[in-house]
């Protein structure tokens, strides 16, 4: 029986689960280690140097203890700053998560796109460069949200989150005079992996319908291509979940669907 590949998926918290869920669908044969750096959450509130100083050695320790075949940085706030540092430091293949500006601008009909991310992600030189390279003539509005990642964590943890609080974070994405304005925003890039956790609520609270662009399926395809052909069906592969804070969490039932039905150890 071939050994299943180990994929380590890393985020500041629970947002990377939205990426994990797509990877599990494409690679049910793999063993998964999901790491939530909740001791340092939210990354969006930290400076660039702090994030590099936190993530690079932490990923080194995780590689040492779990020997993954591939590491996914399922966090835009980290990926837009740490990928070159990680690739310089470690041999393992890495896949990052960065704002899906290119496909969003390619598909927008009104040529008006918003990028909703953490305050850190929208400030990054990396994000600005994606816009200058791939906006393809679209007007791109950068919206840095201070609270949405935390609201998503609260919602997934079963706490009640008020519509008004979500709507306030969302409002600046909607540029235009309403659903009939031919120059209104018609596409919103979900540039933080936490936000797809709230997709149903975002859709309900949007002042008019838009396309929400989630890069997770594209990341899953990239992971699968890098790993090569699947080994078996995953019957022997398991799943682990690590919280860096080591705080107790009672999330098992909410987490299982993201792991394709497996209960993470
Ligand atoms: N999930 C992370 C991202 O994709 C950010 C959340 C945070 O601020 O820690 O950007």
Image (cartoon, rainbow, N blue to C red):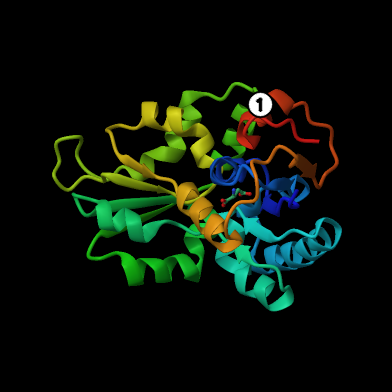
Give the answer, above or below, for where 232 lies relative to 260.
below
Q: How many marks?
A: 1
Q: What residue do we see at 58% from left, 41% from top?
A: 149
Give how far across and how far down residue 219 sits, in percent.
51, 54
Residue 206, visible in the rendered structure: yes
Classify mark 1: residues with Cα within 10 Å, few (<14), some (14-19) or many (20+): few
Give how far across and how far down residue 106 sits, in percent.
27, 58
Give the answer, above or below, for where 111 lies relative to 194.
below
In this figure, which residue is indicated by the disc labeled 1?
A: 254
Give the answer, above or below, for where 153 lies relative to 111.
above
Give how far across and how far down residue 64 sits, in percent.
84, 63
Q: Secondary structure at mark 1?
A: helix
Residue 144, visible in the rendered structure: no
For this view, does 150 lie left or right of residue 103?
A: right
For this view, does 77 lie left or right of residue 255?
A: left
For this view, does 94 lie left or right of residue 32?
A: left
Position of the C terminus, as image quadrant, is top right
Closer to us: 257 or 116 = 257
Q: What residue do we see at 34% from left, 72% from top?
A: 133
Q: What residue do we see at 66% from left, 26% from top?
A: 254
Residue 209, by quadrant, is top left
Return the residue found at the far bottom.
Answer: 88
Give how far across and how far down residue 90 sits, in percent.
73, 73
For this view, does 161 lie left or right of residue 235?
A: left
Q: Is mark 1 within 8 Å of ligand 1?
A: no
Closer to us: 232 or 169 = 232
Q: What residue do we see at 61% from left, 38% from top?
A: 150
Residue 79, by quadrant, is bottom right
Closer to us: 222 or 230 = 230
């Amino acid at each position: 029986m071939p050994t299943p590949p180990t994929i380590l998926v890393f985020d500041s918290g629970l947002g990377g689960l939205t990426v994990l869920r797509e990877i599990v669908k494409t690679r049910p044969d793999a063993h998964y280690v999901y790491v939530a750096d909740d001791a340092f959450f939210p990354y969006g509130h930290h400076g660039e140097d702090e994030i590099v100083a936190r993530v690079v050695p932490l990923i080194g320790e995780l590689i040492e203890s779990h020997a993954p075949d591939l590491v996914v940085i399922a966090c835009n706030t980290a990926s837009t700053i740490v990928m070159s540092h990680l690739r310089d430091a470690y041999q393992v293949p890495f896949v990052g998560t960065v704002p899906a500006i290119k496909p969003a601008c390619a598909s927008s009909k009104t040529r008006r796109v918003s990028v909703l991310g953490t305050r850190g992600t929208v400030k990054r030189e990396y994000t600005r460069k994606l816009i200058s390279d791939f906006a393809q003539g679209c007007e791109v509005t950068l919206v840095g949200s201070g609270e949405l990642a935390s609201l998503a964590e609260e919602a997934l943890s079963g706490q009640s989150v008020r519509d008004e609080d979500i709507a306030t974070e969302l409002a600046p994405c909607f540029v235009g005079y309403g659903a009939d304005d031919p120059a209104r925003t018609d596409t919103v890039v979900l540039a933080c992996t936490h936000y797809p956790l709230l997709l149903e609520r975002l859709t309900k609270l949007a002042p008019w319908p838009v396309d929400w662009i989630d890069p997770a399926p594209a990341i899953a395809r990239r992971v699968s291509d890098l790993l090569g052909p699947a080994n078996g069906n995953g019957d022997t592969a398991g799943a682990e979940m690590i919280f860096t804070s080591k705080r107790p969490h009672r999330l098992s039932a909410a987490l299982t669907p993201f792991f394709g039905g497996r209960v993470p150890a």
